[in-house]
Image (spheres, rainbow, N blue to C red):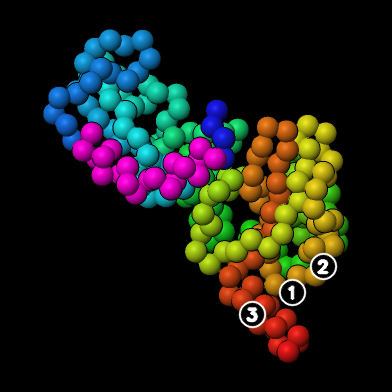
Amino acid sequence: MWSLSDINRLNGNATTNARKLRREAARKRKPQCGIYGCSHRAEHSTVWYDIFSDDPKGVIQTCPDHGWADDPDLFRCENCERVMVDHYTWERYQVQLHGDSLCLRCAAQRHFDLSENWIHPSTVSRVVLEPGDGPLFNRETCVLIVSRCRQVLAVKQPLPAGVVFHDNAEFDSSAGHQISGENLLDVIRRLDQPFCPVLDAAYQFAVSIGLYVRASAKSAEAEQAAARRG
């Protein structure tokens, strides 16, 4: 299991290592098959990626009897069609969304693009933590059930273009009670533009529920605040 510092280092070296990985994948003479327990020489090379950048992060070498799918830590995203690493830390980077198996990067783009996932703050009357299935936001009762937020972001994952972080609160993943951050209903009541709530980090014992807004609205809000101060 990796730490956040490992991810920072990996991302920092990604561009430099990308050329090396592509050369490794293109080599005609292959090393031993990378599938656990196999002693045969590899004949195929598959470059794999992660959710943090477009640079390749590794190469898996496989023999004729095996393929990249025999590695339990890899999966193929059905949107970008890349072979992706499943996780580095406690978070999984593969999710099921609308019947598709997606990497979190593609899932985030799709989730934030859908207008029904954006909620106007004036319509929210209560924020609760009730577990179970059902809609995240009940538009008849005006109740936001944050325990039903979809995870479409991971720690250190870049945001889709046009989306910015506004605020978050952290909750104990076992007991469900809030352990940090301001009351989310108070945060929502101060907003004056639609927001999108998602699970944006999963740790060993806690999760983060983040509130996101569109970048243009955030910029306008900042300009208005600066004008009032001036």
Quadrant where the N terminus is found in the figure:
top right
**Can you give x and y, in whole percent of width and height, for residue 134 in the image?**
72, 44
Q: Is residue 66 above or below residue 114?
A: above
Q: Is residue 27 above or below residue 138?
A: above
The span from disc 1 to disc 2 (Cα, nearest Å) is 8 Å
Q: Residue at x 32, y 47 (%)?
A: 16
Q: Quadrant of residue 173?
A: top right
What is the three-letter code of the residue carrying label 2?
Arg
In the rendered structure, find residue 209 and report the number of the disc placed on it.
Answer: none
The span from disc 3 to disc 1 (Cα, nearest Å) is 11 Å
Query: Is residue 23 inside the magenta stretch?
Result: yes
Find numbered disc 1 in the image and state the secondary structure of the residue it sits on. Answer: loop
What is the three-letter code of the residue carrying label 1?
Asp
Magenta residues? Answer: 5-24
**Can you give x and y, in whole percent of width and height, for residue 20 in the image?**
26, 40
According to the picture, the residue beneath numbered tag 2 turns out to be 189
Q: Residue at x 17, y 31 (%)?
A: 27
In the rendered structure, find residue 192 and report the number of the disc placed on it.
Answer: 1
Q: In front here: 87 or 96? A: 87
Question: Going from the N terminus, do you reach mark 3 or mark 2 first?
Answer: 2
Crowding at mark 3 (Cα within 10 Å: few <14, some 14-19, many 20+): few
Crowding at mark 2 (Cα within 10 Å: few <14, some 14-19, many 20+): some
Q: Residue at x 72, y 81 (%)?
A: 225
According to the picture, the residue beneath numbered tag 3 turns out to be 220
**Can you give x and y, in whole percent of width and height, for residue 51 in the image?**
46, 45
Crowding at mark 1 (Cα within 10 Å: few <14, some 14-19, many 20+): few
Horizontal side, residue 130 vs residue 70: left or right: right
What is the three-letter code of the residue carrying label 3?
Ala
The span from disc 3 to disc 2 (Cα, nearest Å) is 18 Å
